[in-house]
Amino acid sequence: MAKPEHSTDPPAQLRRLKLLAISSTGGHWVQLLRLAPAWDGCDVTYATATEDFRARVAELAAQRGQPAPRYMLFTDANRQQKARLVRQMLEVALILLKVRPDVIITTGASAGYFAIRLGKLMGARCCWLDSIANAAELSLSGQKAGPHADLFLTQWPELARPGGPQYRGAVL
Amino acid sequence: MIFLTIGTQEPFDRLVKAVDGWAGAHSMPVFGQLGALKPESYRPVNFAFEQFLGADVYQEKLDACQMLVAHAGMGSIISALTRSKPILIMPRRASLGEHRNEHQLATAHKFRDRPGVHVAFEEGDVGGLIDRLLRADSTTWVSDLPHEASPELIAALRFFIHTRSRAL
């Protein structure tokens, strides 16, 4: 998507890529952090549903000689909590408006789905990495988000399909 | 100390009861992180527990424990493997209302052969497996799990991030 006329951002080619790494907490987050070396050199923002890992991501970046990442929060929600899901979607939208990421990478779940659907509207390139927990079939959120992602990955070779998710390795 | 961790979303009474029964008959201390308990959820009587742990306390328990007992969640499994702690997992069953689908059963089957990971498919297997794992000399096993994803996956993501075109 073209930058609006009033934007003061330099074009993407002249600055560090803005990358948003987003997931819910628990297993999705543990997996997301194992991908961190992939975004060395980017201007990184992490988003998750707890304050707990703010220091951890700063430490992780410092260990790799990277500048401290931004850290943003959204409301935790599961599939049954419709009101919280709506709130989470609005918060993810606000994060996207603040960060304006060039690239979005997510391991799930609902927040990752929202980030991909909304991020695509804003012109971001998006990657969905389905959780390694989904060994027999893709996650429900992966089935919904994957077709909208620019890069759609599964962590199990037997779940890769032509036109569907690709297998390009796993978090462990 | 044995660290029991069952995620934050749903109670897992079958596993908590099994570990509580074991703890009542053994002197080894157990600490549990039991997630969002419902009023009718089982509460252990033989060991201390919290529903939620902050990241720091979770790490402390992880470092201090001799082994983990957990639901078959990837957060628990990866946390154990990265610290070379043996882990006994029991899959939550959607058929028993313990999760949304049977993915933990698939996880248990996929990871049962990985060194350091042990599976109790039924609650009746939990106590015996804890005994067996505690008898085994855990110092002989050191996880070879690196601290990051596979080089292939990191490379694929790096290529994706830095290739500013949509066609891949």
Image (tube, helix red, strand yellow):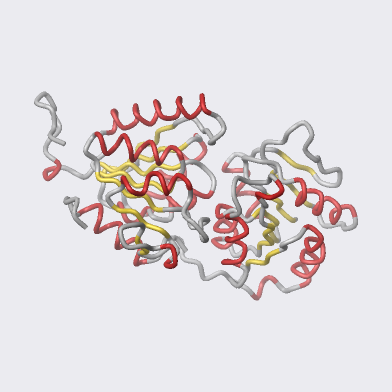
Relative to residue B116, is residue B2 depicted above or below?
above
Q: Residue lying farthest left?
A: A5
> Residue drawn 12% across and 45% down?
A13
> Residue drawn 41% across and 29% down?
A89
Q: Residue lying farthest bottom?
A: B140
Image location (x, y in percent) of residue A14: 11, 43
Image location (x, y in percent) of residue A137: 49, 57
Which quarter of the figure has residue B36?
top right
Relative to residue B66, is residue A109 depicted above or below?
above
> Residue drawn 55% across and 55% down?
B74
Q: Which quarter of the rendering shows the N terminus of chain A?
A: top left
Image location (x, y in percent) of residue B17: 81, 49
> Residue drawn 34% across and 30% down?
A95
Q: How many marks?
A: 0
- Left or right for A145, reference B50: left
Name the residue nearer the viewer: B130 or A78.
A78
Image location (x, y in percent) of residue B160: 25, 55
Q: Residue lying farthest right?
A: B25
- Left or right for B47, reference A41: right
